[in-house]
Image (cartoon, helix red, strand yellow):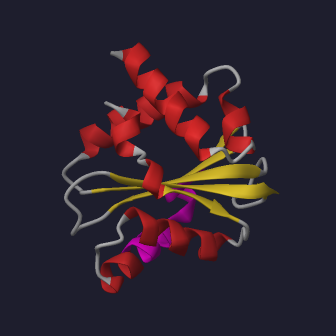
Amino acid sequence: MQLAESIQQSKILLLDYTTHIGALETLIAKAIPESSTDLQFHALEEIRAKSEAKEINMGKGFALSHARIEGIQILQTSVALFGEKTNYLPGDPVHTVFCTMIPPSESRVYLKFMSTLTRFLLQDNIELAFLQRDINAIVQALKEFDAFQA
């Protein structure tokens, strides 16, 4: 699994507001921009309906919102970099939220993505690029991680 392919530079955004629903709406629209507003609304409702299971505070300032969504064909991910740590979810304050949606038939792909993302986020000093909101540094770190994993 190549993280740089799953987390594209164009889907990493700087958010200055940190309201939970506003951020989630923006992340979904960025992850699946060509999708209908009905599908985007369905994704929002799917994540919110079971927020305890669908949203995870991963620690170290990272959070994950995710869902299986009928109507998408491949794993889609967007990333929000907040201007300051916030209580986006219960638990430790977060500075970065990953929003991931997968087709229901792609559970194995999702598990592989989560395993790879977790290893990436556990690297020493990786949090610094996210805290600095440096999209180019994040993309470079993703590419270096992918090269090292190959």
Image quadrant occupied by the N terminus: top left
Which quarter of the figure has residue 76? bottom left
**How many callouts does the rendering have?**
0
Q: Is residue 47 magenta?
A: yes
Up/down of 74 relative to 19, above or below? above
Image quadrant occupied by the C terminus: top left
Q: Residue at x 73, y 67 (%)?
A: 16
Q: Residue at x 55, y 69 (%)?
A: 24
In the drawing, does residue 142 fall left or right of residue 37? right
Q: Is the magenta region chiefly helix, strand or loop?
A: helix
| 140 or 122: nearer the viewer | 140
Q: Residue at x 59, y 46 (%)?
A: 135
Q: Residue furthest front?
A: 136
Q: Position of residue 148 (x, y in %)?
A: 42, 14
Q: Position of residue 59 (x, y in %)?
A: 69, 39
Residues in magenta?
43-57
| 148 or 40: nearer the viewer | 148
Q: Position of residue 61 (x, y in %)?
A: 72, 43
Up/down of 12 relative to 61, above or below? below
| 10 or 88: nearer the viewer | 10
Up/down of 85 relative to 33, above or below? above
Q: Position of residue 127 (x, y in %)?
A: 70, 34
Up/down of 144 relative to 89, above or below? above
Q: Is residue 14 magenta?
A: no
